Amino acid sequence: MLLGVNTYGQLSGFERVFDRAMGLYATPERIYLSSRSQLWQLDNALTPGQLYDGYDKLYIPRIAYTTGDLDIHDLAVEADNERIIFISTILNCLATVSDRHSCIPLWKPKFISSLVCEDRCHLNGLAMVDGKPRYVTLCGESDVVDGWRDNRQGGGCIIDIQSDQVIAKALSMPHAPRFYQGKLWLLNAGTGEFGYIDTDGVFQPVAFCPGFLRGLAFSGDYAIVLKNSKFQQLL
């Protein structure tokens, strides 16, 4: 769903269908989107000042990587080399695109013994710091297929991928970690809470949102959270 404002100053939305749209990353001129078996790059075709039917953006699919079903969750682009990186939940790893294979694995939790198509820990969220991947969220430290489901209420954690160390535990289905204004924010989706990790590695809730929380983004002093397919703004 693309949301904007029309020539009358009214809210305007456009819907386009992608099979199981999951990961989303946007820049002012480009959108990256993962679907069931492909990772798409959509570019704005308009030049500065140009309009199309009254709108200043016209995103057109330009590149698509056929990945197969990697169950891609969070994705981002590195600042220095524009490399696309993403979380493959079914492979339990951080990966990038490839012109010959489904993906190129870059990192996995040290307790994961092998890269196989088994969702063992439900690795899902990625936080970037200074344009580099830094933190990931997962729902359980398990090395067997669907093992994370056995401890969904308090088995979630955050890993610093630079040190391979767990920096926060006792989380419930954590998703969407984001580093913003010097803090590591996330959605403790199992409890319906939005908050941050303090210096002692403890989750500090800021707001409760009934329902299962997913995407998280920031604009100024506001956090924008996707909850049950509706947007809710939180101070």
Image (tube, rainbow, N blue to C red):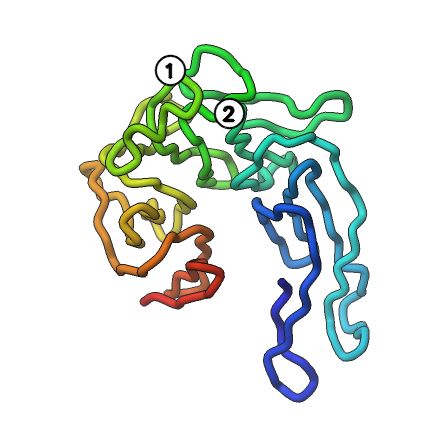
Q: Amino acid at mark 1?
A: Phe
Q: Position of residue 26 (x, y in %)?
A: 61, 53
Q: Position of residue 202 (x, y in %)?
A: 20, 40
| Crowding at mark 1 (Cα within 10 Å: few <14, some 14-19, many 20+) | few
Q: Amino acid at mark 2?
A: Cys
The residue carrying mark 2 is: 93
Query: What's the distance in space between the residues labelled 1 and 2, CA to CA?
Result: 11 Å
Check the picture and name the quadrant holding the N terminus.
Answer: bottom right
**133 or 62: which is nearer to us?**
62
Toward the bottom, the furthest residue is 8
**2 or 121: which is nearer to us?**
121
Question: Relative to residue 54, is residue 157 depicted above or below?
Answer: above
For the question of whether residue 13 can be seen, the reply is yes
Question: Relative to residue 233, is residue 163 depicted above or below?
Answer: above
Check the picture and name the quadrant holding the C terminus.
Answer: bottom left
Q: Is residue 5 left or right of residue 146?
A: right
Find residue 34 and report its image quarter: top right
Number of the label disc, if any, that sits on residue 111: 1
Where disc 1 sits, the SS reads: loop
Question: Which residue sits at x=80%, y=77%?
Answer: 53
Question: Which residue sits at x=65%, y=43%?
Answer: 35
| Crowding at mark 2 (Cα within 10 Å: few <14, some 14-19, many 20+) | many
Q: Position of residue 52 (x, y in %)?
A: 81, 73
Where disc 2 sits, the SS reads: strand
Number of the label disc, if any, that sits on residue 182: none
Question: Which residue sits at x=60%, y=40%?
Answer: 77
Q: Position of residue 176 (x, y in %)?
A: 43, 45
Task: Say which label, 1 or 2, has the lower sequence index.
Answer: 2
Question: Relative to residue 129, is residue 148 depicted above or below?
Answer: above
Question: Which residue sits at x=57%, y=45%?
Answer: 23
